[in-house]
Each structure stands twice: as C-alpha cells, then as structure tokens.
Image (cartoon, rainbow, N blue to C red):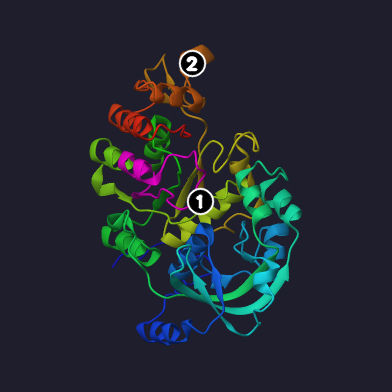
Amino acid sequence: MTQPSIAPHGGTLINRICTPEQRTEFLDKGEHLPRVQLDGRAFSDLELIAIGGFSPLTGFMGQKDYDRVVNEMHLENGLPWAIPVTLSVTEEIAAPLKEGSLVRLDDFSGRFVGVLELTEKYTYDKVHEALLVYRTNEEKHPGVRVVYTQGAINLAGNVWLLQRDTDVRFPLYQIDPAESRQLFRDKGWKSIVGFQTRNPIHRAHEYIIKCALETVDGLFLHPLVGATKEDDIPADVRMRCYEIMLEHYFPKDRVILAINPAAMRYAGPREAIFHALLRKNYGCTHFIVGRDHAGVGDYYGTYDAQYIFDEFAPGELGIMPLKFEHAFYCLRTNGMATSKTSPSTKDERIHLSGTKVREMLRRGELPPPEFSRPEVAAELTQAMQEKELSYEI
C-alpha cells in the first residue's frame, strides 16, 4: 500500500476523542464538575486538538509553551508553532477551579462536550501577545479585539472531546486528519497541496491552485468554516461556490473538498505558519501561500506571510510552502497571470477590489468573467441580495 510521505507534526497524530467507556465515565461525573463555557473559537480549538489537527498538542497550552510560542514561534520542546492555543477565562471563573481536578467544558449552548484535566492556571500579558502575534496592539484588529475581550487567566491541561459529532451543515465534507490521510493513501497520492481560504473562490485563486496542481498528485481544498468576522461571506455560501467550481472547472479525481473547523485569527504571517502545520497534520506535503494570507485591513505587507517561512531552518516545518504572487487577468495574453509570467503593463491588468465587487453584487450585477466564473458570480449575487449584507470578498 502506498504510504503518506509526510508525518504529523511531532511524529504522532493525536487522538483525544473519548472511547465509549471514557465517555460514560465522564458523563456520570459531569453534573458534579465545575463548568467552563466555550465560545466558538475555543470549541473549534477543542475539536482540532481532539481530532489531531493541532498535533502535537494534547490540550490547551501551559505557560511554558505559551511564552515560547508568543516570543519565539516554537513550543517548549523546540517544535515550530506560531499561534497560542489557550483557554482564557475571567478571574471569577478561574478562582474556584483546582489544579489537578477535572473541569467540564460546555459549548456555547450549554451542552456538555468535553473535559479539561486542569494542570495550570496562569496570567498573561494581552498587549504583549497582540504585538508579537498580530503585529499590532490596535483593538480594531479583529484578532486583537478577541484577545483584549477574553479572560485574564489561561487554563491549561489535556482535554477530551466526549464524542465527534457530525457537522450538520456539511456532513459530506467533514473529513478529519486520520480520514484524509487514508483517502490520500487510497488514491495513491504521495504529494498533496493544501489550500486555505475563508473567501469564495475566484479566478486568481483558481489560477494559483491549478499552477500548484500541475506539480503534485492531488489537491486538498480545505476552506475554513469556523468563526470569522461578521462581514465575511458565510460558510454555506462559500461551500456552494466550491462545489460549483469542482463540478465545472476542476478534475474531480484529483481534488478532495473538506471543511476546516478552525476559527480565523486574522494573524497574517503567523497564521500562515499555523495553517501550514494544520494541513501537514491532515497529510498535505505542500501548502499554498498567496497574497496577504490570513490578513485583514492594512496590517501586513503583501507578501509578509511568505517571508515568515524563511525564519525557519530548511525542513524545520516539514511542509513545503508554495509561494505565489498576486494573480490578475492579463489583457495582452487573454488569461490569468502574475508579474512573473505576464509581459503586460499595469494598464493591461484587471484587478478588481473587494469593495468594487461588493458594490456590483449589491446592485445585482455579475462581476466580469475576468474576476469570477459566471456560475460562482451568480451564487454570490443571489446570496448578497437575499441577506442584504455588506459581505467582504
């Protein structure tokens, strides 16, 4: 049998999903345990720890891991890691919790979903985290705003997810790391490129994805469906756009579409590393890094998310970044291109801003085919008019 050519980060794919016996034991204890309610991001983090997406993490970070990740982009054991994964609560909630005890974890609806084996409680410097992880201390940055509004105490320790529920929104596309790795083996793929996006797929995305697909065995199209900004396009709309693209414009036998349950941090360069390591755990050998990956506003330079990969020793990350420049429609060659491949002048390049596209969609106008495939444009126009929201493209 063909084996995957990449090991999980740290060498072992973590599994923190309860066995039936463990689940029964925790359920029996649940009514008597102190409770912490998780917000959307914390619940996504719990899921990803449990299914191995955040391997080698087995729980929420203790202070030594937290400090080194924030300051040096490595875990305490020396493995690269770029974003702190923490469970933050208020001092009032943290005070009665005893280290060495179990804590019941409820989701935002109050449902018992997991258990934390509490080993540590510690304070942290929110501004320091913001400046190093997000490169700004401005509260208007959506990631920084989350840090500033969350609790002042981090709870650390191993976690257990009571059970892996099926995502009722996208049951066909819930493919966890163990399953994706098996799918890659079954298909005989030795090289797989992962693609991250929180936006609907457009022609520039399609171009760089297909360029990458020329060099590998398969594509793992892995849109993020966890918590995003309110003005981002909803996940269900984006998923319909991906389905349209797969139906009409991609070779079906060389693409796997799956959902990424992670929440967006909007941490730009650091999140590019974070996203790459997550896809490594899903079995990808390569990862696409385009223009302003995981960026927001003007907080990051156009290619800062590519430059950050050079801060790690060759081979240290264990996954190969594929770096692409900003793609555009070239009027001289009548096709998609970048400055590396097009002889055109600036006036011969069609770049449509997100603002301009949103205005067209609100008016019921289809963006031109140079920006979006017509079927995708029609889907976005309908969604925009139905919701009457100023979505970000």
Disc number placed over residue 377 in the picture, else none: none
Q: Residues within 10 Å of mark 1 (few under 14, many from 20)?
A: some
Q: Position of residue 21 (x, y in %)?
A: 37, 87
In this orientation, which residue lies closer to the viewer: 189 or 358? 358
Q: Disc 1 and disc 2: Cα gap in Å?
A: 30 Å
The residue range painted magenta reads 213-241
Picture quadrant where residue 209 is located = top left
Mark 2 crowdedness (10 Å alpha carbons): few <14, some 14-19, many ≥20? some
Expressed as whole percent of the image width and height from the top left, the position of residue 72 reads: 71, 58
The residue sitting at 73% across, 58% down in the picture is 71
Question: What residue did someone put label 1 on?
Answer: 320
In the image: residue 219, left or right of residue 84: left
Residue 246, image x, y percentages: 28, 41
Q: Residue at x 46, y 51 (%)?
A: 286
Q: Which mark is residue 344?
A: 2
Vertical position of residue 64 compared to residue 146: above or below: below
* Secondary structure at numbered mark 2: loop
Q: Is residue 190 magenta?
A: no
Q: Quadrant of the N terminus?
A: bottom left
Q: Amino acid type of disc 2?
A: Ser
Camera sees residue 29: yes
Counting from the top left corner in percent of width and height, residue 147 is at: 66, 54
Q: Identify which amino acid the numbered label 1 is placed on.
A: Met
Relative height, residue 243 to residue 56 (above, below): above
Total numbered badges shown on the rendered structure: 2
